[in-house]
Image (spheres, rainbow, N blue to C red):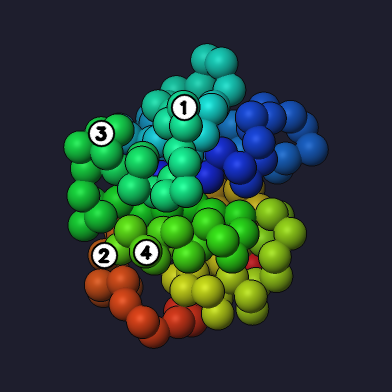
Amino acid sequence: MTVISAALFGTDWWQPGLPGGAELLRECAARGWTVVLTGPGPAGAPVLSVADPGADPVRAALELVDGGPGHAAAVAGSVREVRAARRAGVPCVALAAGGDTGPELRAAGAAEVHRDAAALLSVLDDSLLARPRAFGPVGAATGGTGSG
């Protein structure tokens, strides 16, 4: 299961100015991964979406599919969203396209940081999304590896 922050791109995943957003959603769905957006998603997206994520969007996404953190990875676009994933015990990939810098996202606990969705898509098979527990349990340590 993959939890993706809808706030990262709002509901405009399909806009050309957001490199790789729509393609990332389609590819995750094509691989049979359950994708949950932590907020309202675009109409026709191949994903589920949490209508009202409240203060704990990652946990709300997990509850939507009766999933556990051991079978999930999150994609976040802000330090706040990385921290929400950590609170839920879910490893996190961050996209610097959301405004916070790579070092800020890593310091918050992101295991990987990519420039944008297109950059993540180009290394998807080697990313945390393809193997959420490769980085071990989510704990107090920060940092990790990443690209872009």
Where does residue 139 sit, x and y in percent of width and height?
A: 31, 77
> Mark 2 or mark 3, which is nearer the start of the sequence?
3
Name the foreground residue: 62 vs 94: 62
Alpha-carbon neighbours of circle 1 within 10 Å: few (<14), some, or many (≥20)?
A: some
Q: Which residue is mark 4?
A: 87
Please give the name of the residue rendered at 70% of the width and 70% of the height, measured from the top-left corner: 101
Chain-order first, disc 4 or disc 2:
4
Q: Residue 128, how many percent across, how many down?
A: 39, 61
Tell me the CA gap for discs 3 and 4: 18 Å
SS for dot 3: loop
- Give the spatial CA distance, label 4 vs label 2: 16 Å
Quadrant in which the C terminus appears:
bottom right
82 with respect to 101 (left or right): left
Which residue, given by chain and number where applicable, does mark 1 sit on? 51
Residue 123 lies, in percent from the top left, at 51, 57
| Residue marked by disc 2 | 133
- Residue 129 in view: no
Callout 4 environment at 10 Å: few (<14), some (14 to 19), or many (20+)? some
